[in-house]
Image (cartoon, rainbow, N blue to C red):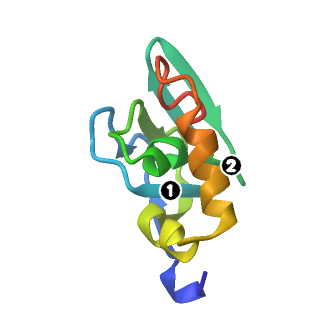
Amino acid sequence: MKPDKKHKRVISKGTALYKSGDPSGMIYILEKGEIMLEGGGVQETFKEGEVVGAFDSLLRTEYSKSAYAATPCTVTLLSAAEQLGQLKDSLSLKIVSALLSKTDQSEPGYWS
């Protein structure tokens, strides 16, 4: 992916990246800080270098959990559609699609 397609954002503590039920489509790479993922009675903290929002975005569903900045954060946003578009007709896309279609749909977003 070209650097000009990346979008860095600084997010204040307590700010929502997205809420459960919001349309998905963005993948967040945590560059600095911590993000709290909440939903379904589960809370999970994500730290630098981890990815949030990918599961729901790649499945093209609504976000199944809410994500908030637990501390001031810097994230890089990636469009799932752009990422998948780069894989068009590739073996990689076929493998990712097959794996995602076989996940446990009773707990969507479990991986984030």
Q: Position of residue 101 (x, y in %)?
A: 53, 37
At x 56% / y 49%, what residue is drawn? Answer: 97
Q: What residue is shown with label 2?
A: 50
Asked if 58 appears above or below 70 in the picture, the reply is below
Residue type at mark 2 is Glu
Q: Could you tell whether 58 is left or right of 21 in the image?
A: right
| N-terminal-most mark, 1 or 2 | 1
Q: Looking at the image, which is closer to me, 111 or 106?
A: 106
Residue type at mark 1 is Ile
Asked if 76 appears above or below 65 in the picture, the reply is below
Q: Could you tell whether 53 is left or right of 51 in the image?
A: left
Q: What residue is shown with label 1?
A: 27
Q: Position of residue 81 (x, y in %)?
A: 42, 66
At x 44% / y 15%, what residue is drawn? Answer: 40
Q: Looking at the image, which is closer to me, 44 or 103?
A: 103
Asked if 43 appears above or below 70 in the picture, the reply is above
At x 60% / y 61%, what residue is drawn? Answer: 93
Q: Position of residue 69 (x, y in %)?
A: 48, 43
